[in-house]
Image (tube, rainbow, N blue to C red):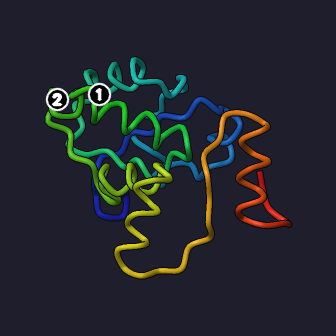
């Protein structure tokens, strides 16, 4: 984004990882050392007024908070567009059921899986899948 001349804002709670990033013109214009939570991200959005947000570069926390921002209407409230991977695609890949359905739609082979909540249910599922299996 910097190479394209765009102003960038980085939010990263890990000071050590940012210290090892490039300095000067290649560093983000603004860096926030804050927890990546829906409330903290909304505060940064209020202050910085970004046009867009990249969720796919924030690891699992970034994905989860991005989905929360989308579902709560915060992104619409501040007119922030999601750049790159769409929220719908993130939701589809994070939800095992939706992901499985999408793969089945395109006839992609998929390992059998079951969602269970008890050890007894896990044993029954393992017997259906066959051993060895992952739990």
Q: Are marks 1 and 2 in contact (CB under 8 Å)?
A: yes
- Between residue 20 and residue 109, name the one nearer to us: 109
Q: Is 125 drawn above or below residue 15 in the view shown?
A: below
Q: Is residue 4 left or right of residue 51?
A: right
Residue under label 2, please give it.
78
Residue at (40, 24) in percent of width and height: 38
Q: Position of residue 70 (x, y in %)?
A: 28, 36
Query: SS of the residue at dot 1?
Result: helix
Q: Position of residue 69 (x, y in %)?
A: 32, 31
Residue at (38, 67) in percent of width and height: 102
- Between residue 25 and residue 129, name the one nearer to us: 129
Q: Is residue 78 left or right of residue 130?
A: left
- Between residue 41 and residue 8, name the one nearer to us: 41
Q: Is 93 drawn above or below residue 11 in the view shown?
A: below
Q: Is residue 127 left or right of residue 72?
A: right
Q: Is residue 110 left or right of residue 84?
A: right
Query: SS of the residue at dot 2?
Result: loop
* Disc number for residue 45: 1
Residue extending farthest to the right is 132
């Amino acid at each position: 984004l910097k190479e394209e001349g765009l102003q960038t804002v980085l939010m990263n709670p890990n000071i050590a990882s940012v210290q090892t990033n490039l300095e000067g013109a290649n560093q983000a214009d603004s860096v926030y050392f804050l927890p990546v939570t829906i409330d903290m991200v909304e505060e940064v959005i209020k202050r910085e007024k970004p046009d867009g947000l990249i969720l796919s570069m924030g690891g699992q926390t970034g994905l989860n908070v991005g989905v929360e921002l989308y579902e709560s209407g915060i992104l619409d409230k501040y007119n922030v567009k999601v750049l790159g991977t769409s929220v719908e695609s993130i939701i589809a890949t994070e939800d095992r059921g939706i992901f499985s359905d999408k793969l089945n739609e395109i006839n992609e082979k998929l390992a059998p899986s079951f969602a269970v909540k008890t050890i007894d249910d896990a044993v029954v599922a393992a017997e259906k899948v066959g051993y060895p299996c992952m739990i």
